[in-house]
Amino acid sequence: MQDAIYKTLLDNLSEGVYFVDRDKRILYWNKAAERMTGRTAGEVLGFCCADNILVHTDEQGANLCLSGCPLSAMMTDGRYHEASVYMLHKDGHRVPVTVKAMPVYDEQGNITGGIETFTDNSANRLLKEQNAHLTSLSLIDELTQAGNRRYANITLETRLSEFKRYGWPFGMIMFDIDNFKVVNDTFGHDAGDKALQMVARSISDNMRSPASLFFRWGGEEFVILASNVNGRQLYDIAERMRILVATSFIVRGDDEIRVTVSAGATIATAEDDAESLTRRADTLLYRSKKEGKNRTSTDSGQPAGFADSVASS
């Protein structure tokens, strides 16, 4: 009876929770863990978390399962460990989470296993709840659930007006999936749609500021309009998203399909209108394509101001 009460309690938590033994084999996996990872308990019990299940990475895409894993560190020193990492969803996209690892001891004081919890850090969870309303206004792209081109144009005009009236800085990042036609031609249009969804989730789930918005521009192109940033910060945002996409994948049969994105990032100026800003971002994107793809290009003479702005997208 007591075990059933504990299981009911754990399964109703909003945090993902799992237990491991001394060899880091998974013994318990709660409902929130299923929801946040896309993997059922039946798929993970008896396996180690590093068996292509969670695959924690840092912001640069480095695999933490070999070094830097909070669970491994806890097993080594017996201490509580906490870290902000990116977790692998079953669909292939990365989810930003805070993980907390704590040891379990036997009566002799020996570590017999551990407990790890993980909390979704997606800053746009509230925005996801608003998508139903935006969809009713025809402002959401049905396939990717990102804002559509119409919504992007409305937001761009608003940001330009705010910048010219109040001096509020913002920038545009334009992304394009590299070699997208090859994915469609090789694996079919359904795989192409899955790749679009994976890229959209990888970026939208990792936006850090509700004031910065993400859109599907058209085809395989996406746009971020990032508020309160300078040139360096905008570049860092673009690079973070580029790396997240490059370390994600979709599964098609026995194949792991990986794609990369190229990006062009530019800060709005007082002389800009929507056309000139978009044209400059597109030109920088083309430069990234020309110079080898899977990279970010930005203006050579970005404004040096706004040094105290927070890179918050």
Image (cartoon, helix red, strand yellow):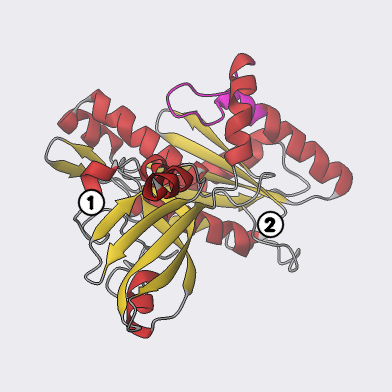
Which of 33 and 198 lies nearest the eye of the viewer? 33
Q: Secondary structure at mark 1?
A: loop
Question: Which span of residues is magenta-colored?
Answer: 137-153
Q: Residue at x 29, y 63 (%)?
A: 20
Horizontal and vertical percent position of residue 223: 54, 39
Q: Secondary structure at mark 2?
A: loop
Q: Quadrant of residue 237?
A: bottom right
Q: Which mark is residue 45?
A: 1
Horizontal and vertical percent position of residue 88: 34, 51
Q: Residue at x 63, y 38 (%)?
A: 126
Which of 237 and 121 lies nearest the eye of the viewer? 121
Q: CA distance from mark 2 to mark 1?
A: 44 Å
Q: Quadrant of residue 211?
A: top right
Q: Is residue 290 visible?
A: no
Horizontal and vertical percent position of residue 268: 70, 48
Give the mark count: 2
Q: Which residue is mark 2?
A: 229
